[in-house]
Image (cartoon, rainbow, N blue to C red):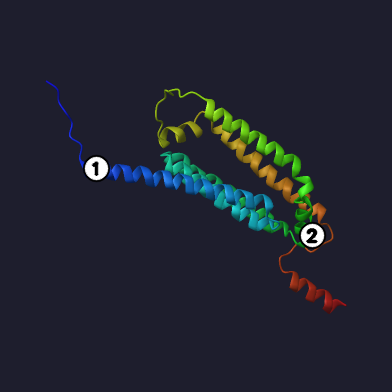
Amino acid sequence: MTLKMKRNPSTSKAYYLKEQGMEFAFYLCGLVAVVTTLRVITHTNPVHALLYLIVSLLSVAGVFFSLGAYFAGALEIIVYAGAIMVLFVFVVMMLNLGKATEKQEREWLSPSLWIGPGLVSFLLLAVMIYAIMTAQDQGIDGKIIDAKAVGISLFGPYVLAVELASMLLLAGLVVAFHLGREERQGEVLSNRSNDAAQANKEQA
């Protein structure tokens, strides 16, 4: 005697619509991530480029959410789009990068300088597509680890590595600020340029 499972049409339809919605969200977030990443590279204003980078990281988090990796998506938002990018925006605004930096960025974005990196990027993309198309499907064995276990590991056996990584990030920000101040020696390091100009006129 065989038992046949009856499928509920409404349940099957809801599952299909959910799968289609997740697939649409995946491609939409991926497209937004690609476009905003290109704007990060091609934008001449550093602050605007960092804002585009934040949007790109949020789009990557959306890709993780659409794939069901909710913990990875949450880490992408909290760590990268949240803490690290806020520090980057703070340092760039503290350096007070002005018109000279935008002019230098335009010189770096000349087409002659991007021929080599562009060809290498397309070559890597072709290799990746070929590897994906020719790869055979293989099952991956593993177990699901919850956020609690990850937190215990980070602040347990690997707490020294976490603290060293934070110190490395802080050292990089301090060095970037120091180099930026040396390159702009003799200029007014303030966002209130109008007030400084007015003070110079009064002294003259």
Q: Residues within 10 Å of mark 1 (few under 14, many from 20)?
A: few
Q: Residue furthest top?
A: 1
Which residue occupies 64% across, 58% down? 48
Q: How many marks?
A: 2
SS label for mark 1: helix
**In the visual, does 146 lie left or right of 120?**
left
Q: Amino acid at mark 2?
A: Ala
Instruction: For the residues labelled 1 and 2, say whether their Cβ atoms are less than 8 Å apart.
Output: no
The image shows residue 110 at horizontal and vertical percentages of: 77, 51
The image shows residue 93 at horizontal and vertical percentages of: 68, 58
Which of labels 1 and 2 is toward the front? 1
Q: Residues within 10 Å of mark 2 (few under 14, many from 20)?
A: few
Residue 69 visible in the current orientation: yes
Image quadrant in which you'd find residue 139: top left
Name the residue nearer the viewer: 115 or 195.
Answer: 115
The image shows residue 140 at horizontal and vertical percentages of: 44, 24
Q: Which mark is residue 204?
A: none
Q: Disc 1 marks which residue?
A: 11
Name the residue nearer the viewer: 62 or 79.
Answer: 62
Placement of the N terminus among the 4 image quadrants: top left
Mark-to-mark CA distance, 1 and 2? 61 Å
Q: Which mark is residue 100?
A: 2
Which residue occupies 61% across, 37% down? 165
- Residue 86 lies, with reference to residue 119, above or below; the image says below
Earlier along the polypeptide chain: callout 1 or callout 2? 1
Name the residue nearer the viewer: 147 or 25.
Answer: 25
Residue 78 visible in the current orientation: no
**In the visual, does 158 lie left or right of 117?**
left
